[in-house]
Image (spheres, grey):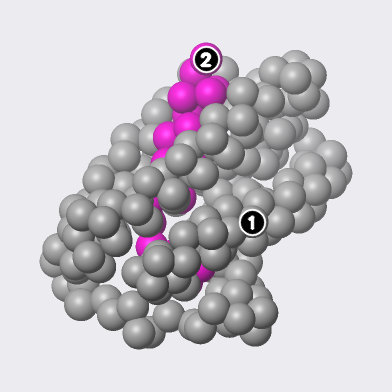
Amino acid sequence: MDLFILGAGMGVVGGILPNPLQLIALTQAALGRWGSAIFVVLVPPLTVDAAFLLMTLFFYQLIPLGIAHYIAYAGGLLVTGFAGYGLWNLRRTGRENAADAKPYSLAGVTVATLAEVTAPGTWIYWVTIAGPILAEGQSHGYWHVVPFFAGSWAGYNGAAVLSTCLMVWVAGLNTSFKKYLFLTANVLLLLLGISYLMRAWFGRSF
């Protein structure tokens, strides 16, 4: 259950934090093209995650479990640091404009997806958070870690769709509402980072 909660929490944070794909989805939703908006929010991230899952699984089969355990410490520290920086930077956040989004086209969605692939947060999550969880599956069986990824998938999809709907329906692309979502995501991320560090410290990973 703890893995499911941790995964769901990470997924919710990922779904709330703004990204280029969500900006495209917002413009489509604002135009009433909800099918396109939902597609952009869900399908490209799922494709990216599938590729990163395979790559991370292969990488963690090559390194000793002891090293994976120390990477878990690094992951917890990076997550808490990322959350702290996000909270500190929140007061300096400028106004976001949906016009900055890439257009809804194959090229626009591809560029936004590539931006997601190269984003530091994506690599931090897969290499230092999800990776040690996969390494845990080597010693306890991969079915043991399925709840983490199931929770992450459900949390991300639910939060991404809900936050997009709220920003269009409730806030009308209002920046102040985005700011509250960003604040909520970073506070949750900070708590999850601390929880992940405690999990590594008390040796529950391996």
Identify the image quadrant of residue 110: bottom right
Query: Label 1 sits on what residue type?
Result: Val
Query: Label 2 sits on what residue type?
Result: Met
Q: Main secondary structure of the magenta part?
A: helix
**Would you say 57 lies left or right of 150 here?**
right
User: Depth-wise, is mark 1 or mark 2 nearer the camera?
Assistant: 1
Q: Which residue is mark 1?
A: 43
Name the mark on residue 1.
2
Residue 172, percent from left and from top: 22, 65
Residue 72, percent from left and from top: 56, 38
Observer-nearest residue: 205 or 163? 163
- The reply to whether callout 1 and callout 2 are in contact (CB within 8 Å) is no
Chain-order first, disc 1 or disc 2: 2
Query: What residue is shown at x 35% (from left), y 84% (from top)?
Result: 99
Observer-nearest residue: 28 or 79? 28
Determine whether 153 is above or below 172 in the image.
above
Query: What residue is shown at x 33% (from left), y 78% (from top)?
Result: 98
Residue 9 is inside the magenta segment:
yes
Callout count: 2
Residue 156, percent from left and from top: 50, 44
Residue 24 in view, yes or no: yes
Query: What residue is shown at x 84% (from left), y 46% (from top)?
Result: 58
Task: Classify mark 1: helix, strand or loop.
Answer: helix
Residue 126, percent from left and from top: 62, 49
**Would you say 115 lies left or right of 99 here?**
right
Rounded to the nearest angstrom, the CA distance separating label 1 from label 2 is: 27 Å
Observer-nearest residue: 121 or 77? 121
What range of the chain is rendered magenta? 1-23
Task: Classify mark 2: helix, strand or loop.
Answer: loop
Residue 203 in view, yes or no: no
Identify the image quadrant of residue 93: bottom left
Identify the image quadrant of residue 26: bottom left
